[in-house]
Image: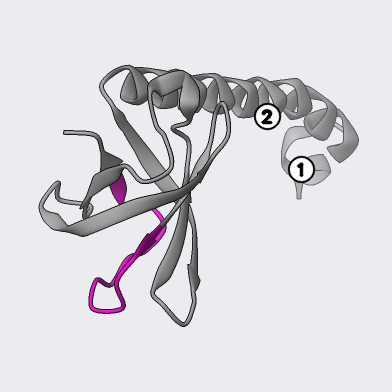
């Protein structure tokens, strides 16, 4: 169809759009990193992993000891609307990431937010 209506080989169209696509992926990556950095400055982070265990849900998020998180800290868990849905207790903390656990009564999904305040 491209050759018929535009008179050019389809590979030229692909070659033209490849750098544009790479640029868009790069911009999305940069903006997501910027958002994560700004949220961390405000004491918040997005939950990126949820694993159901015997004691509750194990969640991982991008706040760590660099942000003042220590094992034993209690954090507020917020849903997509920003409404509190429970608390999470930090079990492990590295410099940039942490793992916490919530109760089984607190349903949590990736994309929820943990907050220090």
Residue 79 percent coordinates (x, y): 21, 55
Disc 1 crowd, CA 10 A, few/some/many (<14, 14-19, 20+): few
Closer to us: 21 or 79: 79
* Image position of 108 (left or right of 32): left
Q: Is residue 25 above or below residue 2?
A: above
Judging from the image, what secondary structure is the residue with disc 2 in?
helix
Q: Could you tell me which residue is drawn at 55 percent across and 28 percent down? A: 96
Give the residue at the far front of this rendering: 72
Q: Which residues are magenta?
A: 101-113
Picture layout, residue 85 above or below residue 71? below
Q: Secondary structure at mark 1?
A: helix
In this orientation, which residue lies closer to the viewer: 81 or 59? 59
* Left or right for 26, reference 53: right
Where is mark 2, residue-wise?
Answer: 21
Q: Residue at x 15, y 50 (%)?
A: 81
Q: What's the distance in space between the residues labelled 1 and 2, CA to CA?
A: 19 Å
């Amino acid at each position: 169809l491209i050759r018929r209506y535009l008179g050019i080989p389809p590979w030229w169209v692909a070659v033209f759009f490849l750098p544009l696509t790479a640029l868009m992926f790069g911009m999305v990556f940069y903006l997501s990193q910027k958002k994560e950095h700004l949220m961390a400055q405000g004491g918040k982070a997005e939950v990126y992993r949820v694993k159901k265990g015997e004691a509750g849900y194990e969640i991982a998020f991008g706040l760590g000891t660099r942000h003042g998180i220590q094992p034993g800290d209690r954090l507020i868990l917020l849903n997509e609307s920003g409404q509190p849905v429970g608390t999470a207790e930090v079990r492990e903390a590295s410099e940039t990431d942490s793992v916490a656990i919530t109760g089984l009564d607190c349903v949590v999904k990736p994309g929820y937010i943990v907050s220090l305040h």
